[in-house]
Image (cartoon, rainbow, N blue to C red):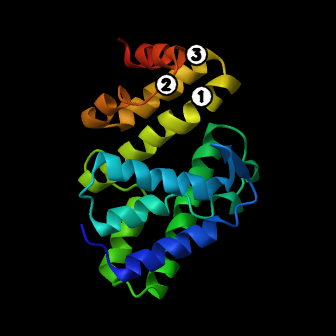
Amino acid sequence: MELSQRFEKAIVRFDAYNANDPHHEEFEGKNYPKELLYAQRMSERLDQYVPEAPEYLRLASRCQHIGRWEIPRNSYPMDRKGYLQWRNTLKTHHAKIAGEILKDCQYETDVIDKVTFLLLKKELHRNADTQLLEDVICLVFIQYYLDEFASKHDPEKVVSILAKTMKKMSPKAISEVAKIPISQEIKALIHQAAGT
């Protein structure tokens, strides 16, 4: 699929914004701003999962966590209700930043609206594009972040989170998990969460 010049410009702008993340992560011997690395992983996974994905979906995938560090988790109560409030505030924050960048890159309102719709995670399970983005998010989590999460929590909590994650995934995405290189311990937790 041929992508527009403005697409390339938007990706550069998204990445430049996420390069400001003060939190860093080491990967394959290199140090990255955390949300920049996450954004690159999202694009990479989308390319593998749906190579023919439309431009607006590629944009949404790349800016899914844009500016995430600007609203820390501890700025909300550290309970389930606080977590959900934080996540909802973040969605709006991501959509606002992305919308401004896309407008600067000369995107039409309908493309900006589609990206915003996806970033706000509207109509999960009912909208094919929202489902696709959620699938990519879940696959990136399992491939790159599940190990660290599992090391910090007891197995029961990990199984519970995995069960919730799998409920958000399409059957296609769940079958894709088998292709991800993961440890035997994590595999066992996934099977437990899936009830297999």
Quadrant (top left, top right, bottom left, bottom right) of the N terminus: bottom left
Q: How far apart are marks 1 and 2 (CA)?
A: 8 Å
Please name the residue shown 57% across and 63% down the image: 66
Other residues around mark 1 within 10 Å, as few (<14) / some (14–19) / many (≥20): some
Residue at image x 70%, y 67%? 20
Q: Measure the C-alpha gap from mark 3 to mark 1.
A: 15 Å
From the viewer's side, name the closer residue of 161 and 136. Answer: 136
Q: Which residue matches tag 2?
A: 182
Amino acid at dot 2: Ile
User: Dot 3 corresponds to which residue?
Assistant: 156
- Above-or-below relation of 173 to 134: above
Q: Is residue 147 left or right of residue 178?
A: right
Which amino acid is tagged 1? Asp
Query: What residue sits right under mark 1 in the picture?
Result: 147
**Left-right relation of 124 to 13:** left
In the image, residue 42 above or below residue 183: below
Between disc 1 and disc 2, the foreground one is 2
Q: Earlier in the sequence, mark 3 or mark 2?
A: 3
Q: For the residue labelled by badge 3, is the local secondary structure a helix, a strand or a loop?
A: helix
Measure how far apart labels 3 and 2 are at the Cα level. Answer: 19 Å
The image position of residue 82, as x and y in percent, is 65, 45
Mark 1 in CB contact with mark 2 (< 8 angstroms): yes
Q: Is residue 104 above or below residue 179?
A: below
Q: Is residue 138 left or right of residue 22?
A: left
Residue type beneath disc 3: Glu
* Contact? badges 3 and 1 (CB < 8 Å): no
Quarter where residue 157 is shown? top right
Q: Is residue 124 visible?
A: no
